[in-house]
Image (cartoon, rainbow, N blue to C red):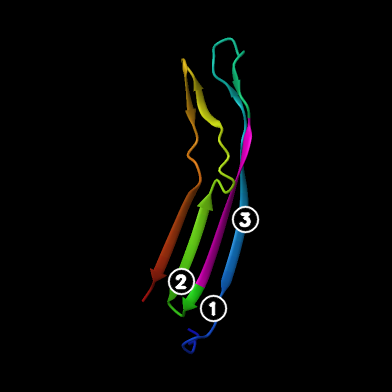
Amino acid sequence: MRRRALGDAGDLVVSLGARYEGGYFFNDTNTMENGGHVTYDAAVSYQVLDNTSVAVNVSNLFDKKYIAYGGFGADFYNPGREITATLRRTW
């Protein structure tokens, strides 16, 4: 285990990702289709001390709206942008 002096800069990690979900038909005759879409995510984490880190994650980075499920007379939309922050301490 490597010891850091108080105030030492930690490890910074930046991540970007993309998720693809293909389209599908939602009726018996295959005439109504939900198109495919790409959703982008991002994350940043920083190790503040030897056993303490902070992270911020963003799902649906550009807040793109699409139909997640359709059919039977109703459309259901995807969750919008979601931002979560985590402070983690291990011992």
Q: Taking 55 as reference, is 90 above or below it?
A: below
Q: Are marks 2 and 1 in contact (CB under 8 Å)?
A: yes
Q: Position of residue 67 (x, y in %)?
A: 54, 29
Type of the residue with mark 1: Gly
| Residue situated furthest left in the rendering | 91
Q: Are marks 2 and 3 in contact (CB under 8 Å)?
A: no
Q: Which mark is residue 57?
A: none
Type of the residue with mark 2: Ser
Would you identify the image quadrant in which residue 38 lies? top right
Q: Residue at x 48, y 84 (%)?
A: 1
Give left or right: position of 74 versus 40. Answer: left
Label 1's element?
A: loop
Q: Position of residue 87 (x, y in %)?
A: 41, 67
Would you identify the image quadrant in which residue 15 lies? bottom right
Give the labeled residue for mark 1. 10
Q: Measure the alpha-carbon separation of dots 2 and 3.
A: 19 Å
Q: Magenta residues?
A: 36-46
Label 3's element?
A: strand
Q: Position of residue 5 (x, y in %)?
A: 48, 90
Label 2's element?
A: strand
| Residue situated furthest top in the rendering | 29
Give left or right: position of 91 versus 13. Answer: left
Q: Measure the alpha-carbon separation of dots 3 and 1.
A: 20 Å
Give the labeled residue for mark 3. 16
Question: Is 62 one of the magenta-colored residues?
Answer: no
Q: Which mark is residue 53?
A: 2
Give left or right: position of 78 versus 88. Answer: right
Q: Quadrant of the C terminus?
A: bottom left
Label located before the other in sequence (3 or 1): 1
Question: Is 43 one of the magenta-colored residues?
Answer: yes
Label located before the other in sequence (2 or 3): 3
